[in-house]
Amino acid sequence: MFFCSECGAETLKWSGKCPNCGAWNSLKETARFTGKSNKKKNTLISSYDIFDLKKEEPQAICDIVPTAEKRMMSGIKEFDGTLGGGIIPGMVTIIGGEPGVGKSTILLQISDKLAEQGKKVLYISGEESKEQIKMRSKRLGCKAERLYLYCQTVLDDIIQTLKEFEPDLIVVDSIQSIYLDSIESSPGSVSQLRETTALLIRLAKTTGIPLFLIGHVTKDGAVAGPKIIEHMVDTVLYFEGDVNNQFKILRATKNRFGSTNEIGIFEMSSTGLQEITDPSMYFISQEEVVAGTSVGCVMEGSRPFVAEVQALVVPTSYGYSQRVSLGLDQKKLSLLIAIIEKNLNINLKQNDIFIKLSGGIKVFEPALDLSIITAIISSFRDQPLESKMLFMGEIGLNGDIRPVAQIEKRVKEARKLGYTKVYISEKNKLNRKGEDIIRMNNIRQLIPLIFK
C-alpha cells in the first residue's frame, strides 16, 4: 500500500499527488499486515500480559462515574502549565522541534526532577550511547538515583524490559529510531512508525505509565512521518525559536487533557533549559524609547505578557518595495500597511518596511495590530513615542479599533510594569477606570493623540 505522510490517506497505487489532500510527492510505500501470516508479530502482542484487556460491555454514559484526575507534577512549572497542569497517568506526549533546540535536554531534566521525587524513570535512547547521555546529565546536574538509562532500538526487547522493570515514567528518544523485527522496512519508515507507536501507546494506556516520545521534524517544521502519529498521541508539543536564539517557546498544538493555547518559555544556558516566569521583562527593551518602537500586550493561553514591536521604514532602493516581517505573518503586515494608506493618507508605496518582534517570539493574535501600526507611523515620521505607552486593539479594514479579549488581565500586566498610558478600543468593557486608560474608536485619532 501507499500512505500519505501529510494527511494519512491510504491508496493501493502510487501517484505523484495525494488524491485526498493534494500534497505532492507525499505517498510512501508501506505494508499492511492482515490475518495471522506474521507469526512473530502476533506472538509479540499476545505473549505479554500487559496487553490483556478484560472484555467490556457497552455502558450508558450517564452511569459512568469519572475518576479524579491525579496529575504528576514534574517540578518545572512552565512545562506543567503547557501540559495543562501536570502529567496524567497513561498520557502519551510527543515533543518535536529542530535539531539542537533542547528536546532531549528538557526531557532529561524532567526525568531527573521526577526521579528526585521518588519516581522510577526509564530513559530509552536509540540514538545515543550511555556515555553520551551521562556527559549531558553531568552538565545538567542530574544526580537522581532512580533515573535509569536503557540504550535499545528493538521494540521486542524494550517491551520485555518494561514488563520486568515497571517504571513510573517512560521517555523514548526518539520514536524514529525504534523498530520491530517483524517488519522488513527500515526504522523511521511509515509502517515502522505506525506499528511501533501503536504498540507503545497500547502499553501506556493499559499500564497507566506516562510516555514521552521525541519526534524528528521535517524541513517544514512538522513531525517527521505520517500525520497519523499526531492523531494517535494525546499531546503534541513543539519547540519554537531558532537554535541560536536563547529563548525557546514550548507550545502545545494538541492536548486532550488541557488547553492548546498554553505555552512555556525557557532560556537556554550552559546548565540546561531554565524556565522564565516573568517573560515581559525579557521581551521589552529597558533602554530609551526610539523611533519605530511600540509596545503591545499579547495573550498566550491564560498568560499575558508585554511584547515590543520594532519597525523600520526607509525609502526603497529598488523598483519594488520590500515588506519583511519576523515573528508576524507577512500577509497581515501587507494588510495593515494598506489600512494605513487608506485611512491616514500616508503613502508608503515608495518605502521598504521591516517589522520585528523582540525576543524571537511569534504572535498570531490580532491584539498587536494597533501596536504594529503605531510603530510603522513612528518610524515613517522619525518621531519616537512617549515612554510607558502601550497599545492594544484589533484593526478593521476601515480603520476602526475593535476590542480584544481578556482586557482585564492585559491592563493589570501593563500597570504592574509601570505603563502610564494604555490605548484600547472604546468598545472594550473594562471595569477599571483611570487617567492611564485612553479609549479610541478609529486609527484616525491615533496621530493627534500620540504625536502632540
Image: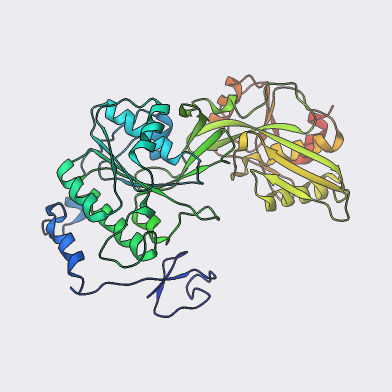
Question: Can residue 441 be seen by looking at this rendering?
Answer: no
Q: Which quadrant of the rendered structure holds the N terminus? A: bottom left
**Relative to 237, is 353 on the left or the right?**
right
* Residue at image point 48% right, 52% down: 217
> In which quadrant of the rendered view does residue 123 lie?
top left
Q: Is residue 355 left or right of residue 228?
A: right
Where residue 229 sits: x, y (%)?
38, 57
Expressed as whole percent of the image width and height from the top left, the position of residue 374 reads 75, 36
Nearer to the camera, 184 or 70: 184
Q: Is residue 407 left or right of residue 33?
A: right
- Residue visible at 75% across and 24% down? 289
Up the image or down, 257 lies above or below 178; here it is: above
Q: Residue furthest bottom?
A: 13
Residue at left offset 79%, top offset 29%: 450
Q: How many labels sit on residues?
A: 0
Between residues 432 and 205, which one lies in front from this camera angle?
205
| Residue appearing at x 30%, y 61% in the figure | 195
Foreground residue among 405 and 440: 405
